[in-house]
């Protein structure tokens, strides 16, 4: 999960919804742009310290390096609206499926660019 750390209402809502059918397990995250808040949030969620990241960029790069059977399969992005496009683009381009909170982007051009990336990569993209 990117975003949704301590004090962020929507993160908790998405975590609860994701667990409803017991098909989704939170295994890593970059929960805040503040590394200390991200770590505190991840520890409260009982994540392994090496899977709690200081930034969404670090999450994407480090998870990509893990063996396929160990890395995250889908990245849920629940950041403020203006921070949707860049992490979604990076996640898709690095082979991850994406669940993105609405709005998908902050501009029409970003939406068109994101659509092209989804078409090119073939990764799943879900908008909540």
Image (cartoon, rainbow, N blue to C red):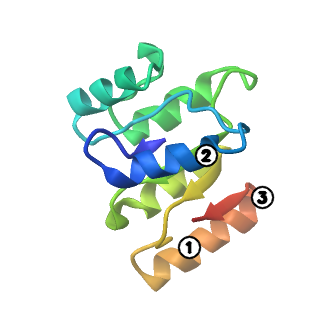
Left or right of 110? Residue 67 is right
Q: Nearer the viewer, mark 3 or mark 2?
A: 2
Foreground residue among 91 and 50: 50
Mark 3, secondary structure of its residue: loop
**Could you say where residue 2 lies in the image, as x and y percent from the top left?**
44, 44
Residue 127 relative to residue 73: left or right: left
Q: Which numbered disc covers residue 113?
A: 1
Could you tell me which residue is drawn at 45 percent across and 33 percent down? 29
24 up-or-down from 99: above or below: above
Q: Secondary structure at mark 1?
A: helix
**Cα distance in 3D space between marks 2 and 1:** 27 Å
Q: Which disc number belongs to residue 122?
A: 3
What residue sits 50% from the left and 50% below the top?
14
Residue 98 place in picture, x, y as percent: 61, 53
How far is disc 3 from disc 1 in space, using C-alphas? 14 Å
Across and down, in percent, residue 16 comes to: 53, 44
Q: Which residue is mark 2?
A: 18
- Where 116 falls versus 93 (above or below)? below
The first of marks 3 and 1 along the sequence is 1
């Amino acid at each position: 999960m990117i975003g949704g750390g301590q004090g962020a209402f929507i993160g908790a809502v998405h975590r609860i919804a994701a667990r409803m059918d017991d098909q989704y397990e939170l295994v890593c995250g970059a929960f805040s742009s503040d590394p200390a808040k991200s770590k505190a949030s991840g520890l409260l969620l009982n994540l392994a310290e090496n899977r709690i990241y200081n930034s969404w960029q670090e999450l994407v790069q480090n998870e990509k390096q893990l063996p396929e059977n160990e890395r995250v399969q889908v990245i849920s992005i629940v950041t403020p609206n203006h921070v949707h496009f860049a992490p979604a683009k990076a996640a898709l381009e690095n082979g991850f499926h994406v669940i993105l909170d609405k709005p998908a982007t902050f501009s029409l051009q970003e939406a068109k660019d994101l659509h092209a990336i989804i078409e090119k990569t073939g990764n799943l993209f879900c908008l909540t």
